[in-house]
Amino acid sequence: MTHSISQTKRARHRSPESQADFKQQLLAYAKQLYLEKGFEGMSIRALTEAFSMSPMSFYGYFESKHDLARHIWIDFFQELLGELLAAGQGKRSPVQVLSAHVHTFIAYWESHPDRYRMVYMADLRTEADQASMIKVGDHPVYKQLAVLARERVVACAYGKPVAERTVRLQCDLMLAKAVGYLHTVIAMRRYAIADREAFKKAMVKDIVNTVVEASDE
């Protein structure tokens, strides 16, 4: 992989603007490394060598490799949010919207298995790595995803009051079931699913039906 960074090597990036620009260059290069070599290939050493910078300089921009990954995740989530919003357009009922929401969520990660592995199968062995990942939940786009899911779950009650505890439980179950399906088809490739499309269709139906049934209780 080639990367033209001669001007970057010479720059000292004293101003906040130039520091921000350089950080974006690091992110762009890290994404390319990730796409070509996977998470393991997106190493701090590869980045520091490409940009002729010391590891200490790298840590001035990112706390760790997982912190770097977290910034890349945000782009994934922003793309996913756009697709989820589009999925809800033109649907006749809240149930149809929720069904499209779940199907789109699953389809997004199925279409990008490497991204799924990076986001949901990260090896968080240290407290620092875990703390870095927790910060993802503080980003506006992640909060938007959570709010959107909640709104679509609540809408399936058609105006009837639903306890907040029930809403939260259904949102948690929806995510857990969807990720469970994805983990089965992406991470457990040796497990032969008889009919993947039927399996996915049944999973989406189960998620939606569970939400609807909970709103009737």
Image (cartoon, helix red, strand yellow):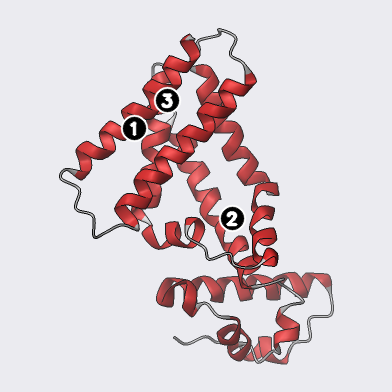
Q: Nearer the viewer, residue 191 or 40?
A: 191
Task: Say which element carries label 2.
Answer: helix
| The one of 155 and 124 positioned closer to us in this rendering | 124
Please give left or right for residue 59 compared with residue 146 in the image: right
Of the image marks 3 and 1, the number of the one nearer the N terminus: 3
Q: Is residue 130 above or below residue 202?
A: below
Which image quadrant for residue 115?
Answer: bottom left
User: Residue shown at 42%/15% (left/top)?
Assistant: 213
Give the residue displayed 32% in from the left and 27% down from the top.
205
Label 2 and label 1: CA atoms lie apart by 25 Å
- Please tell me whether mark 1 sits on a helix, a strand or a loop: helix
Query: Percent x, y for residue 15?
Result: 84, 75
Circle 1: residue type: Val
Q: Position of residue 6 (x, y in %)?
A: 62, 91
Mark toward the start of the polypeptide (2 vs 1): 2
Q: Would you say residue 29 is visible in this rendering? A: yes
Can you tell which mark lies on residue 74?
2
Residue matched to label 3: 97
Name the residue tied to disc 1: 204
- Location of residue 54 by image quarter: bottom right
Residue at the extreme right of the image, as rendered? 15
Q: Earlier in the sequence, mark 2 or mark 3?
A: 2
Disc number lying in front (3 or 1): 1
Identify which amino acid the numbered label 2 is placed on: Ile
Note whether residue 94 is visible: no
Left or right, residue 152 beside residue 185? right
Q: Position of residue 58 (x, y in %)?
A: 70, 80
